[in-house]
């Protein structure tokens, strides 16, 4: 049975002090539902976040990683290094990484392989741009993002994959996909996974929605049958808002 998950992608926000303050506030909150809670602080603050959350049920994830195990890649961080500090979940393929750091599907396939080789769980992000949706091409785009980065995997690898559908036009814009738009795309994604693998893989993979999720719209979006939670940006930076979203599952 697939899990409900609410993950906070902090992006490039919160220094060491702000990370500690937000974590203290998050630890005081009660998870009243059944969703796993994940936060993804910046690389430099991952270990302190992991350490302060060791006595809680909140999981810490990285926002990115390099595909190589080690070597001359100045400024980069490997899966093994993340595992070494206790972090075993990584977000890959975020649209900001695709757009600003030119991460292609092919590169992402390599990152996926490296993460899985290191027994990490992946929150794999993908989603169409506004022009794609206007042109009615959103399913083509999403289908090929999935296929190019993930469909080389064996069915067994999918127990470590979480999908996060994030339509680019809804990220940080205040414009959310309607619950129906999210449901339609999630159902398409699940069907595409079922066609490639089998219904077991498709029914067991959690598919999160991301893009301007807020306390005011979380319950309706998460209420859709193929939406298994959210990847939250801006609203994850406030403990009250984030836990109001987490408790949309209560
Ligand atoms: P917002 O919730 O700020 O729109 O960001 C979504 C996102 O990009 C999460 O990864």
Image (cartoon, rainbow, N blue to C red):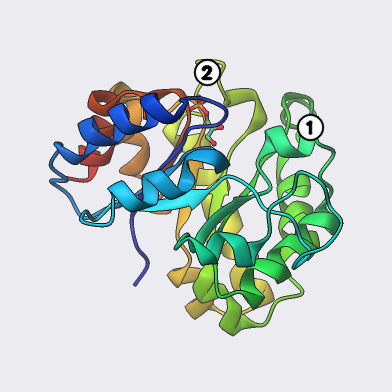
Q: Is residue 124 visible?
A: no
Q: Is residue 164 left or right of residue 112?
A: left
Residue at (72%, 38%) from the top-left corner? 97
Q: CA distance from mark 2 to mark 1?
A: 19 Å
Q: Is residue 107 visible?
A: yes
Is the residue 159 above or below the residue 149 in the image?
below
Q: Is residue 3 left or right of residue 104?
A: left
| Mark 1 close to ligand 1, CB under 8 Å | no
Q: Which residue is mark 1?
A: 99
- In percent of width and height, residue 86 lies at 44, 63
- Indicate which label's residue lies in the foreground, 2 or 1: 1
- In percent of width and height, residue 197 lies at 63, 78
- In percent of width and height, residue 33 lies at 17, 49
Judging depth in this view, the residue of 197 and 157 nearest the camera is 157
Is the residue 173 above or below the residue 189 in the image?
above
Total marks shown come to 2
Which numbered tag is attached to residue 30? Answer: none
Q: Quadrant of residue 48?
A: top left
Residue at (58%, 45%) from the top-left corner? 63
Classify 10 Å Cα crowding around label 1: few (below 14), some (14-19), many (20 and above).
Answer: few
Residue at (57%, 28%) from the top-left corner? 12
**Quadrant where the image shows the C terminus:** top left
Q: Which residue is mark 2?
A: 175
């Amino acid at each position: 049975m697939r899990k409900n998950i609410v993950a906070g992608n902090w992006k490039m926000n919160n220094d060491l002090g702000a990370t500690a303050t937000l974590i203290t506030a998050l630890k005081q909150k009660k998870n009243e539902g059944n969703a796993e809670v994940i936060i993804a602080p910046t690389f430099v603050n991952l270990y302190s976040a992991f350490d302060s959350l060791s006595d809680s049920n909140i999981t810490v994830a990285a926002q990115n990683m390099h595909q190589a195990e080690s070597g001359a890649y100045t400024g980069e961080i490997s899966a093994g290094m993340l595992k070494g500090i206790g972090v075993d979940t990584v977000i890959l393929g975020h649209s900001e990484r695709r757009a600003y750091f030119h991460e292609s599907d092919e590169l992402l396939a390599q990152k996926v392989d490296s993460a899985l080789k290191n027994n990490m769980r992946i929150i794999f992000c993908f989603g169409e741009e506004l022009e794609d949706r206007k042109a009615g091409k959103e399913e083509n785009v999403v289908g090929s993002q999935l296929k190019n980065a993930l469909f080389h995997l064996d069915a067994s690898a999918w127990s470590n994959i979480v999908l996060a559908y994030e339509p680019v036009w809804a990220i940080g814009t205040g414009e959310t996909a309607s619950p129906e738009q999210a449901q339609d795309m999630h159902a398409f994604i699940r069907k595409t996974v079922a066609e490639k693998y089998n219904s077991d893989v498709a029914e067991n993979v959690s598919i999160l929605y991301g893009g301007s999720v807020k306390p005011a719209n979380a319950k309706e979006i998460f209420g859709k049958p193929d939406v298994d939670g959210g990847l939250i940006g801006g609203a994850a930076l406030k403990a009250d808002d984030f836990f109001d979203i987490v408790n949309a599952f209560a």
